[in-house]
Image (cartoon, helix red, strand yellow):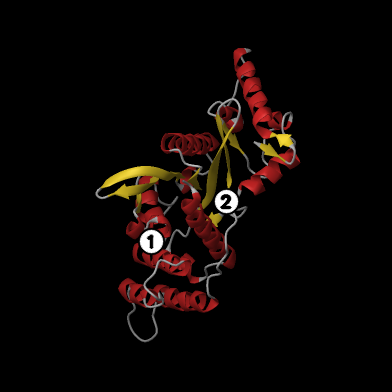
Amino acid sequence: MVFNGIDISARFYDFQLDVQNQLQQGALLTIEEHVQHLLALSSVLLLKPGRTHADLHNYIEPRTCDALSQHNILESVYQPFPDAYKSRIEEIVKRLVAIVPQNGPFTRLDASLQISALMENGICSPTNRILLSIRNMVERLPRYVVEDGPKETEFITRHLEAILTPLFEDLENNNATIQPDASINITNGASLGNRIGCGEVKAPYQALNHHLVSIDLMRIAVLAKDASDKHKLKSTFAFLVVGMFHCFYQLAVFLSFFFVQAIMSPFTSLIVTIYNSIPCLKSPTSSSLYALTMCLSSFHKYTRSST
């Protein structure tokens, strides 16, 4: 792969050889500090703007890493979430969480029906998918956060399944998600086919455990690379949830003189906030909706071009 006149494949290969030499000389590589080194052994070049390791800079300059990361992000058409819908959702959720609701009792089911009524045309448009996600949150999120928040199993099954499944699952077009933590697969009838995406989760109480978070980041990178190799995909999709935030990645494969290599970089520079209780939905921020729609449109454009 040549980028801006620079042979990225050759320089990344030199970095891989450097990592192998460090290990042979007894260097200690920690998961917390050397994720890029360890992933290089699996032929995955991890790029995050402004956060590449200094050892990699000996072969690929920082500005080249940042430019390559941006180049690797798929262009997507941003469809803003309608302000009218945002205002209406705020009204519905505020009425739901009110201690004494106006105009009589107002249940989760009432809120769910009113949010469903906002959906139009009977198609899985980005706006309808986000409305489905918000409806699921209204139906399933707890009213209040208890102590340190949910443990990992509850976080996956109650919070993330409610939020993410409507965004990425499309059974009409044979896309399905399974838990845990998450695997996005093409379905063949009742069986699961090719994996096109995967995700890992760390609950809020584990968010500061950099060792476990780094392991999850390595796991999704290796799983995405394995899926790409096995199913001969040009790119695969991954996401990492850490506490109340998640980041979406694209892993793009390129052929080098030496072997198949891959670059993994974020879809967008924005981190999506996860809502952990119903009151948080009273004021969905514009940045969260923007990041969500960007990731959604990028994912669906990417799945159309992945094979």
The extreme left residue here reads: 190
Picture coordinates of residue 101 (x, y %)?
Answer: 39, 81
Q: Report the side of 5 relative to 174 (left or right).
A: right
Q: Which disc is residue 267 wearing?
A: 2
Picture coordinates of residue 289 (x, y %)?
Answer: 54, 65
Name the quarter where the N terminus is drawn.
top right
Q: Report the side of 307 relative to 112 (left or right).
A: right
Q: Is residue 194 above or below residue 144?
A: above
Of residues 276 and 246, which is closer to you in this image?
246
- Residue 276 seen in the figure: yes
Name the image quarter holding residue 13: top right
Kind of residue at badge 2: Phe
Mark 2, secondary structure of its residue = loop
Depth check, mark 2 against mark 1: the one in front is 2
Q: Are marks 2 and 1 in contact (CB under 8 Å)?
A: no
Q: Is residue 226 above or below residue 17?
A: below
Kind of residue at badge 1: Leu
Picture coordinates of residue 169 (x, y %)?
Answer: 38, 56
Q: Report the side of 160 relative to 33 (left or right).
A: left
Q: Which disc is residue 123 wearing?
A: none
Of residues 220 and 121, which is closer to you in this image?
121
Q: Which disc is residue 141 wearing?
A: 1
Name the image quarter holding residue 37: top right
Q: Report the side of 192 relative to 195 (left or right).
A: left
Kindly identify the residue that appears in the image at 32 percent across and 80 percent down: 105
Kindly identify the residue that appears in the image at 40 percent across and 51 percent down: 150
Q: Residues within 10 Å of mark 2 (few under 14, many from 20)?
A: many
Q: Is residue 73 above or below residue 116?
A: above
- Residue 32 seen in the figure: no
Picture coordinates of residue 164 (x, y %)?
Answer: 42, 56
Of residues 189 and 107, which is closer to you in this image?
189
Mark 1, secondary structure of its residue = loop
